[in-house]
Amino acid sequence: MQRRYRVVIAKPGLDGHDRGAKVIARALRDAGFEVVYTGLFQTPESVAEAALQEDADAVGLSLLSGAHLTLVPRVVDELRRRGLGDVLVFVGGIIPDDDVPRLRELGYLEGGIWTKAFVAEHYPQVMVPDAETPMQGRIEPARLLGLPAEDRRRLGAVLFQYHCNDCHAIHRGYSAVRPRLAGRSRELILSTIEHLEQAHYFMPPWAGRPEEAELLADYLAAIAPPRPEGLRFGPSAKGQKNNGDQRQGGTLLKAEEQP
């Protein structure tokens, strides 16, 4: 029997508004999660300690005080001190649009963290010093994209699980998205990631950085099923009729039509 995921919901700092946190806690509980609510006025240390003691799979931070740029990195630092760098962290509250680029630069996506803690632990060679987060530093995109292909795919898998909330976790032996990748080139997969808001995907816009999209494309291309025998996707020849057999990203060509 599959175990239930355990989530710690916390209110770090001096923010005393907890209704939103309680609504999220109740919604997660009703969805089948085990939820631990820490209460108000928690320190980064107490949040991380609660995650350790409760063996949490994820930590949710509610911040309406404007201290997200200070408290979120500190909570993640404390989690890493306790060997919990793989615990998912998601953040909600009042986060101005102007702060989103800085959160991304620090390694956080809208709604959660991606691979920064994992990268810092397993690939320290891609990290460079950063005055605002001296313990972690920051990811240098050029070094990240310069990793060997196998490592890029590994990081893409971690990013995929974070971004998609573990719905397609490879360690659970399946991925609902895999069949949709059949016959798609890496370039087409990357374009899909960058345009998730298109109507036929019914997903929010891509909120990550360009190098994150590159890693995710590496991973998804690696798990994509091979093209059917004798068929390929390619660009339509200008002015050539395709008999209505059009597919996204190109025309489905018969074997005898392949160059």
Image (cartoon, helix red, strand yellow):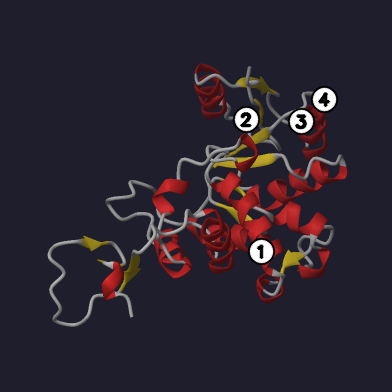
Q: Nearer the viewer, mark 1 or mark 2?
A: 1
As drawn, the label of residue 152 is 1
Q: Nearer the viewer, mark 4 or mark 2?
A: 4
Residue 39 versus residue 112: which sits nearer the camera?
Answer: 112
Q: Amino acid at mark 3?
A: Ala
Distance between the Cα atoms at labels 3 and 1? 29 Å
* Residue furthest front in the image: 256
Callout 2 touching callout 3 (CB < 8 Å) = no
How packed mark 4 is, by other alpha carbons closer than 10 Å (few <14, some 14-19, many 20 or more), is few
SS of the residue under disc 1: helix
Location of residue 18 with respect to 193 vertically, above or below: above
Distance between the Cα atoms at labels 2 and 3? 21 Å
Callout 4 touching callout 3 (CB < 8 Å) = yes
Q: Quadrant of the C terminus?
A: bottom left
Residue that numbered label 4 is attached to: 53
Does residue 10 appear to the left or right of 99 in the view shown? right
Q: Amino acid at mark 4?
A: Gln
Residue 105: horizontal and vertical position, in percent? 63, 64
SS of the residue under disc 3: helix
